[in-house]
Amino acid sequence: MKKIIAITLCMAMTAMMLVGCGAAKEAAPAETPAAEATAETPAVETLTAGKLIVGTNAAFPPFEYVGDDGKPDGFDMALIKAVGEKLGLEVEIQDMEFSSLVTSIGSKIDCAIAGMTVTEERKQMVDFSDSYYEAVQFVLVTADSDIAASADLSGKNIGVQLGTTGDFIAQDIEGATVNSYDKAVDAVNDLVNGRNDLVIIDKNPALVFESNFEGKVKAIDGAQFEFEPENYAIALPKDSALTDAVNKALEEIKADGTFDALVKQYIEEN
Ligand code: ARG
């Protein structure tokens, strides 16, 4: 009996829709009650409908930092907003510890953009978009330091940001004591006050810190220490339709000049 009422109700609603709404002709055939919902389902599924919840660690200039208004800003933030626009999703940024990003993907956040290097270990847990930037680790030392080659790194106190590729490189350096920090700037502060002999961090943040700590620290190209180039990409849940959609958006953003404009604005003019 209940079933019959439900079906009748459903038919009545469908009939009302057909009568009351001029667009009914274009709507999917209304055989099932689900047809109505299907028409509104977005192209890609996210944790919260209509939203792209993005994790970052906003302590990594020029890719992400907290702006004067207290909100995350930087190249990655601008890039992911452009991606969200292409996907018709409202971007919500969640600032968290870098080392928590990968494990939060798919549960707390839809994806992460954080100057994150594609690595084999991370690929066990997440998928990556196409790469959008090439980087390399740099070495920050005090202005008067003679550290200049791989052999000079062994046995040193090395500051890194926890869970980063700089951290992984430092762990492999013979006899080194690795001091890890939640924020890279704290590693640099401890370089200036003598607790660290060097800091290993990505090129662009290294250059920003070199200029912010002008005269106190110098940045050395990681090629001098035989560090390999790295590629940044957006981390996404494994086997998600979101990855293709994000890649398509990135392609469009590159083709229409937005990408180059953002590189100029956030990276080259800094
Ligand atoms: N590229 C390095 C990595 O993937 C460092 C990234 C740090 N990013 C940040 N937003 N703190 O491990």
Image (cartoon, rainbow, N blue to C red):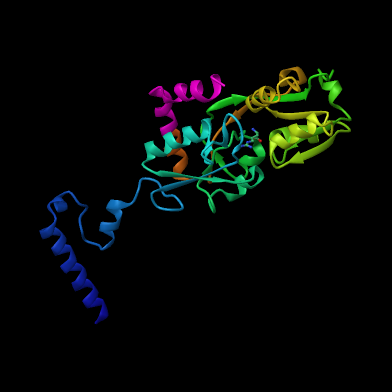
In the shown orientation, is residue 143 left or right of residue 117?
A: right
Quarter in which the N terminus is drawn = bottom left
* Residue 160 picture quarter: top right
Residue 251 magenta: yes
Secondary structure mostly taken by the magenta-highlighted segment of the chain: helix
Residue 202 drawn above or below residue 109: above
Please name the residue shown 20% across and 59% down the image. Answer: 30
Please name the residue shown 44% across and 37% down the image. Answer: 81
Quarter in which the C terminus is drawn = top right
In terms of image quarters, where does ligand 1 lie?
A: top right
Residue 239 drawn above or below residue 61: below
* Residue 245 picture quarter: top left
Please name the residue shown 26% across and 80% down the image. Answer: 2
Could you tell me residue 29's position as x and y percent? 20, 55
Could you tell me residue 191's position as x and y percent? 79, 30
Question: Please, which residue is most extreme toward the bottom here?
Answer: 1
Toward the viewer: 227 or 214? 214
What stretch of residues is rendered in magenta? 248-270
In the shown orientation, is residue 213 left or right of residue 135?
A: right
Toward the viewer: 257 or 191? 191
In the shown orientation, is residue 91 left or right of residue 70?
A: left
